[in-house]
Amino acid sequence: MKDIYALEVERLQAIPDDEFKQKVSEAWLLEENHSPLFDMLGRRWEEDETGISAGCLTQIKMFPRRRAAFVNGKVHTEFTQKIKEDSRIPDSAVFITKESLPVFAEYQREYQALKS
């Protein structure tokens, strides 16, 4: 049985190429068309005492000193560092490709396991 992330990868990869960037931008935003592939790694607006706040994978790459993955209310340093070092993760939603979607699924699954 496919999980929610596999289903989302399939759904987004099925979008015609000429519509892909627009539809992924909509799915990346925290709105009604949001995709769980692009969920925040922590509660929205969660912040630690140093001002680092929770972000999604691309935000952690885009703002490496200001965004992180949070687990149980604290920055998860090792997981955050792994994200920062993974060249497969784009640093902006505009660089998300059909080929990179499985990477988002991989990290969301790993994040869910860390929270368990």
Image (cartoon, helix red, strand yellow):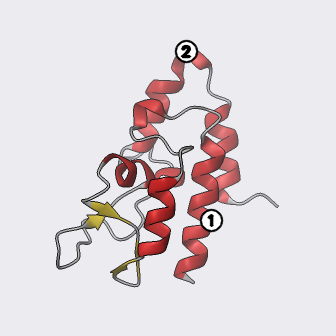
Quadrant containing the C terminus is bottom right
| Relative side of 48 to 92, left or right | left
| Relative side of 83 to 11, left or right | left
Write the residue at 26% across / 71% down.
Answer: 46
* Of the pair 18 and 77, the residue shown nearer to us: 77
Q: As shown in the figure, which amino acid type bears the numbered disc 2?
A: Asp
* Of the pair 79 and 111, the residue shown nearer to us: 79
Mark 2 or 1, closer to the camera = 1
Q: Helix or strand or loop: what does disc 1 sit on?
A: helix
Q: Position of residue 103 (x, y in %)?
A: 62, 49
- Which residue matches tag 2? 18
**Is the residue under label 1 in contact with that under label 2 (CB below 8 Å)?**
no
Q: Helix or strand or loop: what does disc 2 sit on?
A: helix
Depicted 47 relative to depicted 72: above or below: above
Write the residue at 40% across / 41% down.
Answer: 91
Mark 2 or mark 1: whose residue is earlier in sequence? 2
Q: Which mark is residue 109?
A: 1
Q: As shown in the figure, which amino acid type bears the numbered disc 1?
A: Arg
Most distant residue in the front direction: 85
Depicted 66 relative to depicted 9: above or below: below
Q: Position of residue 94 (x, y in %)?
A: 41, 30
* Disc 2 to disc 1, C-alpha distance: 29 Å
Write the residue at 39% across / 38% down.
Answer: 92
* Of the pair 59 and 88, the residue shown nearer to us: 88
Q: How many numbered tags mark residues here?
A: 2
Write the residue at 33% across / 46% down.
Answer: 62
Residue 111: which quarter of the image?
Answer: bottom right
Residue 4: which quarter of the image?
Answer: bottom right
